Amino acid sequence: MMADSAVSVGPKWGPGLIGTTVGLALYGVSVFQYLFYISTFPNDKRLLKSMVLVVFILDTVNTIGLLSFYYRTLIFCRWQITYACTLEMPWDLSTALATLFLASFFVQCFYAHRVWIISGRNILLTGSVVVAALVQTVFGFRLLGAARYTDNITTLFNTPYAPINGMGSAVCDIIITASVFFYLHRLRPRLLREDIYIRKLNLIFVQMGVITSSCSLTMGILYYQDQPTAQYLTAAPGFMLCKAYSNSMLAVLNARQLGYDQQRNVQASSFQLRTLSRIH
């Protein structure tokens, strides 16, 4: 019976371990991006800097929670078949899920504000983003609450809250990505340097949106697998999602440096042209 329990850990939490490993690499990128942000944009509004700090702290706590969960599962509870080691809903996984839901909500609200600005204060479009963000957050915490109430980890895969959370998050990210792409694509900058900056910014928005929406959508789809352990596949994209959101927000904020660099290059080029004209 011990052997069967030990073997079952691989099919159940192996995908999540892969997701956590990839997530650790993404967390390293997130740390670099956060340090770059606080050193490059010290004059940002206090509210924005506070939101970035909160998301980064949530991402850090999420990483610690996942590492603690896998240490307990793969090392401390190895070869043990007690209820506490096999079925009990652990505090570290609960912490990781709670920080994921909160980080997702904050980042989606950040993007909702961007959509509000880019769309010319489109209430319907911005409201759709906010509503979808609230749906994924509310059902995420309903899912966590149900698992804590039953104190059984399998509850995470036996309630309808999980796919609603995943699909709600995916819908929110798709709306954000599509709207930003549409409105930025409509811009017709007069200068070539502005056009290049808009294209790069649009590319970053789309790439980040595709990553986060793909993870959320994959979670929602994998939930409906028929095999008993197949639903644990949702842990692979799920354990990467918090880092994807954190990096997405930081990448968009740090992309502003591209515009500043291009402005300096243009100013330097114009100075060189003026100098050459004087020589000739």
Image (cartoon, rainbow, N blue to C red):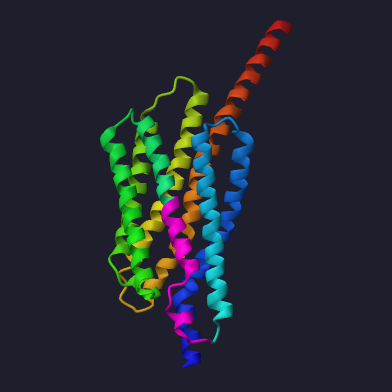
Seen from this angle, which residue lies furthest front? Answer: 149
**Relative to 19, does residue 154 appear above or below in the rendering?**
below
User: What residue is rendered at 50% in x and 30% in y?
Assistant: 196
User: What residue is rendered at 27% in x and 66% in y?
Assistant: 160
**Viewer-proximal residue among 62 and 223:** 62
Query: How far across and down, in percent of the image, does residue 154 sit?
Result: 37, 75
Residue 90 magenta: yes
**Relative to 185, does residue 60 appear above or below in the rendering?**
below
Query: How far across and down, in percent of the image, does residue 90 sit?
Result: 47, 72
In the image: residue 83, left or right of residue 133:
right
Seen from this angle, which residue lies furthest right? Answer: 279
Query: How far across and down, in percent of the image, does residue 141 sit?
Result: 36, 59
Q: Identify the image quadrant of residue 117.
A: top left
Q: Which residues are magenta?
A: 80-103
Query: How far across and down, in percent of the image, does residue 174 sit?
Result: 34, 47
In the image: residue 175, left or right of residue 80:
left
User: What residue is rendered at 53% in x and 76% in y?
Assistant: 73
Q: Is residue 181 visible?
A: no
Residue 159 magenta: no
